[in-house]
Amino acid sequence: MTALARQGTPWAELEAQMIEAAQDDVDWRHGRVPMFIHFAGDDVLEVAKKAYQMYFSENGLGLRAFRSLARFESEVVQMGLGLLHGDSGTRGAMTTGGTESIFLAVKAARDIALARKPMSGRPQIVMARSAHPAFDKAAHFMGLEPVRTPLQADYRADPEAIAAALTPRTVLVVGSVPAYPHGVIDPIGDIAALAQSRGVWMHVDACVGGYIAPFARQLGADVPDWDFAVPGVTSISADLHKYGYSAKGSSTLFFRDAESFAGMGWSFDNWPRGQYFTNTLVGTRAGGAIAAAWAVMKYLGQDGYVRVTERVLATRRAYEGGAARLGLPTLGNPQLSILAYGCPDRDLAAVTRAMTARGWVMGNVTEPPGMHHMLNLTHEPVAGQYFADLEEALAAAPPVGAGSAQKLEARY
Ligand SMILES: Cc1ncc(COP(=O)(O)O)c(C=O)c1O
């Protein structure tokens, strides 16, 4: 057990200890981890770090004290809405991450639905099997019932299955841009039309795609309309700490109008310290995360995002090609930065163990069994090495069925 030492330790010594502590961490700078990191170059990282440090002590809870942060947040929201066909009615705020954005969308949808009409039984969230677990987490924490529907053969959400699952208790319908497991974009137009016809709130989870899909589209990717250009889309989550390339602890949550935005906030005054109001689940917020998001968006600009996106998309195509050469079929038709490919012939658990032994942290999908990547620029130079190692791992793995149990322990 580590007790708090009686005497402090000089920084130089701590720094050395901290460098030592990272010795066994995955070598993310060399693309060895398939997720968790969104790297757009050392220059972008430097801007994010410097901006974060400048506002390290400031608190996003106190926007009346820190006018700078209020301005940064407002401009971040405006820049985000500008990418997502926002108009004079759309609103939004920053949160600390995708999960918080999703929690607050669920809360807003639930509160507004219940305020409109009373309901007996638990309110329901209807979503495809591929939607992120943050919706189930939010449902669990807030007393809703998650209802998951089967996917189409191309791994996209199935609007017909969603239509069949709607009940008078449905308060929220979800579509993903893209869904995390296979990286494919759900048919947002169809789902939104359905939601609108039933008077149900539609949330688009663009935690991954929010800050890459608009640029991928400019570059010619097959990205259908999915944002506020689509009637029936009520709210959108878009993470700045993913393809916004900002510091961890930053996301945006956007709403179609002021009324739905009001569902995000929470206020209280029944205590001896006056009015308490937040738009977020958390109270104190890192000023650094707000400042870094603003600085990175300003630093990159649209051209910068397009440049980085072009390289990320080329990297995804390189991974698709590498997988195809080894007989591993890409699942569905990914258009952005996530792809998954199946491993139909070889024991995937054995392949995963062999790749782990070679220093790769593996990501796996389970339906069907396969491998998963959320790509960034750290993967660009290592694709060749990755597929050379994968070729050897596949050759050494037993074929599926020949005594192999395909017992895969896929972890997020
Ligand atoms: C589609 C999608 N939604 C939501 C989240 C949750 O984001 P966070 O980990 O920032 O809470 C993720 C994370 O990968 C995601 O891929």
Image (cartoon, rainbow, N blue to C red):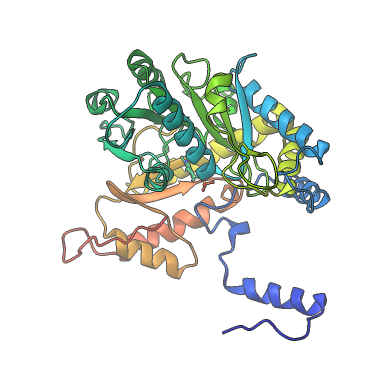
> Which residue is nearer to you in this view: 316 or 387?
316
Q: From the image, which quarter does the C terminus lie in?
A: bottom left
Residue 132 image position (x, y, % from top left): 41, 42
Q: From the image, which quarter does the N terminus lie in?
A: bottom right
Asked whether, in this view, residue 12 is left or right of residue 223, the answer is right
Asked whether, in this view, residue 128 is left or right of residue 4, the answer is left
Residue 258 image position (x, y, % from top left): 58, 20
Q: Could you tell me if residue 337 is visible in this image?
A: no
> Which residue is nearer to you in this view: 399 or 305?
305
- For the point 82% across and 36% down, the residue is 67
**Residue 151 quadrant:** top left
Asked whether, in this view, residue 334 is left or right of residue 52, the answer is left
- For the point 72% across and 44% down, the residue is 60
> Which residue is nearer to you in this view: 321 or 29?
29
**Residue 411 quadrant:** bottom left
Residue 45 image position (x, y, % from top left): 73, 49
Asked whether, in this view, residue 116 is left or right of residue 84, the answer is left
Residue 21 image position (x, y, % from top left): 64, 75
In this rendering, the answer to whether 384 lies above or below 93 is below
User: How many marks can you see?
Assistant: 0
**Residue 298 quadrant:** top right
Q: Could you tell me if residue 358 is visible in this image?
A: yes
- For the point 53% across and 59% down, the residue is 32
> Which residue is nearer to you in this view: 91 or 20?
91
